[in-house]
Image: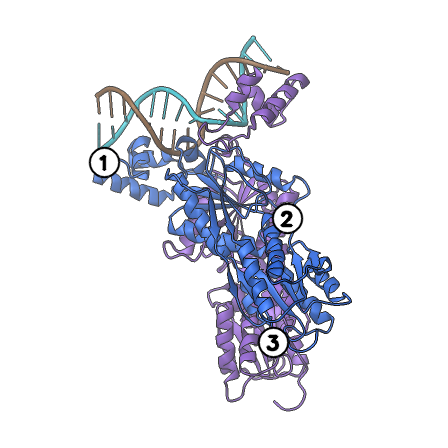
Chain colours: A purple, B blue, C brown, D cyan
Amino acid sequence: MRRKKGTVTIQDVAETAGVSVSTVSRVLNNKDDVAPATYEKVQRVIEELGYTSSLAARSMRSRRTGVIGLIVPDVGDPFSILVMKGVNRAITELDYDLIIYTSGSIKKRSAAERERHFVSLLNGSIADGVIIVTPAATTFSTAAPVVTIDPNNECPECLTIIATNHAGAIAAMEYLIGLGHRRIGFISGRPDLQSANHRLQGYLDALRQANIPQDPALIEIGDFSRETGRICARRLLSLPEPPTAIFAANDQSAFGAIEAAREMGLRVPDDLSVVGFDNIPEAAYYNPALTTVDQFIEQMGYVATEMLLGLVQGEPLENDLHLMPTQLVVRDSCRAITGNA
Amino acid sequence: MRRKKGTVTIQDVAETAGVSVSTVSRVLNNKDDVAPATYEKVQRVIEELGYTSSLAARSMRSRRTGVIGLIVPDVGDPFSILVMKGVNRAITELDYDLIIYTSGSIKKRSAAERERHFVSLLNGSIADGVIIVTPAATTFSTAAPVVTIDPNNECPECLTIIATNHAGAIAAMEYLIGLGHRRIGFISGRPDLQSANHRLQGYLDALRQANIPQDPALIEIGDFSRETGRICARRLLSLPEPPTAIFAANDQSAFGAIEAAREMGLRVPDDLSVVGFDNIPEAAYYNPALTTVDQFIEQMGYVATEMLLGLVQGEPLENDLHLMPTQLVVRDSCRAITGNA
DNA sequence: CTGTTAGCGCCTTCAC
DNA sequence: GTGAAGGCGCTAACAG
């Protein structure tokens, strides 16, 4: 770790190798034909000097930098983590580099502002393309391609990946209804999110389909957090006529709901059935293992990266919207209704 | 999202504002005295055009870029996630930008290679400094400051942050011993990691201190993963004379151990006490809530960032090593030993 | 095959 | 106060 001397540049390499900078540049980019002897020599000097070309300089000259950017709202959020994993997998397979940014829920700037900030920070500058997870903003001024995952609002002009939230919610509800449940509570996600609304709509539609009257008291507005899930479930379970099952709009809320039930002396699934949405890893480990709707989040990240790199490499994509399938995963948090209720 | 036209440059701003590029540059960097009227006008044009200065160009000219880099081995690992959160918090408070890289456990290049790759990718180029989590490499050729968190090996010349692993392990063991346990199994972490070895040493020393003979059969070599924790625990619990308590070198292993116990028909804590290490968020939510040693991981990220930014801003740091305290957090996964065993 | 010549977008002297 | 040059490290044309 040399502190002072600074970076070794392409110049240094050229001089100590006794060639011109362009020759060095050529071997760096495996260009044309360089005399094997020269190539060898330059390569050796590069090795010796521990030279790495400056990303900054490189991206300034050539369009392609070989890095793509990922903007997530929160590094601690399981959804974001899974997307990161998927993107990371694709990135390494396809030999790109990945830069991750957090648009965070910070006070200083709004999420939308930070997103814009990062997009332009990356744009034309450092990254060949950008993936944005649950973007708050709907438009971005950028020359590089953008793919959005699970956007909060319709995002015109953006490539978008989103799960079949409505269908997934229906599947969960049909399962619960098939188990004999009639009073089913719903803990929704943030109402400003498309995906949350689609799930709510699925809940409603499934009820209608089964000819079960809808009871507004059974719908609680959550925010996808564990803590709010707990609070919502408490309210639901304190109703004069409490639900026998709860469908939570994501796994975190479902965990909160189960914890609330437990605190109130209810056993899951014996006294209350709970279904989540997402199928994050913890769902399988949870006690009881959580029945939930898988939306293949990690795969979303992977697909987003594939789409983005396709765009980067100039392949024109036809459809702007990629629908990710959902699938009910039955585990141990639900039980058929037996006697009363 | 304009696709074609490319980026708006400082030139464009200068032209539409009717000034020279240097003037624009001045207002961008709040330099000297710019006539208020000019300042205002330029500012407005910047706003209108949605201009953001190119990170690439900027970092090429000026030393300070205002971004720091974070290199983590795996975005899915709870330890890395907590560090990210801490770094992120410090970053936003101190008004820097953050770039995250994954050195990943990929086949293509070794972790050490990837670390070096990223360090030089960031160095002198994009970032003012770099934080590396559990680095495999021990030296980095870089002009920018480097801080390492929980390095695998001694990392000379690097600023290092590491928890008091030995003391933490002793605390956990004293607690278990105080509860009356005498046969205590240990599931270690990867033996190539400093922190893992320190914890093992703590286990050993606590035993000696309490005059409990050490039994090699009670020590299993794990790798910090849940799955391995499960396997190790299975072996431990299948011993002719199984342990009454298990101390796992991290929370993930502890979860695995509890799951193994459950599969074998043992109840935790009634039939087996388990202590973990890390205090990741899941530990509090787990059923039973996990007794563990907090090593304030998030805080490590925060402190690392503070140290790094101190270095970046030229404040000379005195000590190269920051020791993070550890603290036993008692929850529900242990019980005093009663009758037999 | 290799060196020379232009810039990429920006900041930093230096004049005015 | 402001504009005009020079150059950061690198790549992409051209020459040779």
Q: Is residue A153 visible?
A: yes
Sequence-earlier tag: 3 or 2: 2
Amino acid type of disc 3? Val
- Above or below for A45 versus B251: above
Q: CA distance from mark 3 to mark 1?
A: 64 Å
Q: Amino acid at mark 1?
A: Asp
Category of crowding for the residue at label 2, using alpha-carbon neighbours closer than 10 angstroms: few (below 14), some (14–19), many (at least 20): some
Residue holding disc 1: B33
Residue A132 on image: x %, y %: 51, 52
Along the horizontal axis of the image, is B217 left or right of B25? Answer: right
How many numbered dots are placed on residues in this image?
Answer: 3
> Residue A129 location in percent, x, y?
53, 43
Q: Which picture quadrant has residue B55?
A: top left
> Which chain does the numbered disc 2 sit on?
A
Q: Choose top left, top right, bottom left or bottom right for residue B237.
A: bottom right
Q: Are marks 3 and 2 in contact (CB under 8 Å)?
A: no
Residue at 44%, 47% in the rendered image: B305
B74 or B61, which is in the foreground? B74
Q: Residues within 10 Å of mark 3 (few under 14, many from 20)?
A: many
Question: Mark 2 — residue?
Answer: A89
Instruction: Choose between A87 and B6: the one closer to the eye.
Output: A87
Q: Are marks 3 and 2 on the same chain?
A: yes
Distance between mark 3 and mark 2 Cα atoms: 32 Å
What kind of residue is marked 2?
Arg
Residue holding disc 3: A274
The structure residue drawn at horizontal position 52% and vertical position 72%, both measured from the top left corner, is A188
**In the figure, residue B52 lies in which quadrant?**
top left
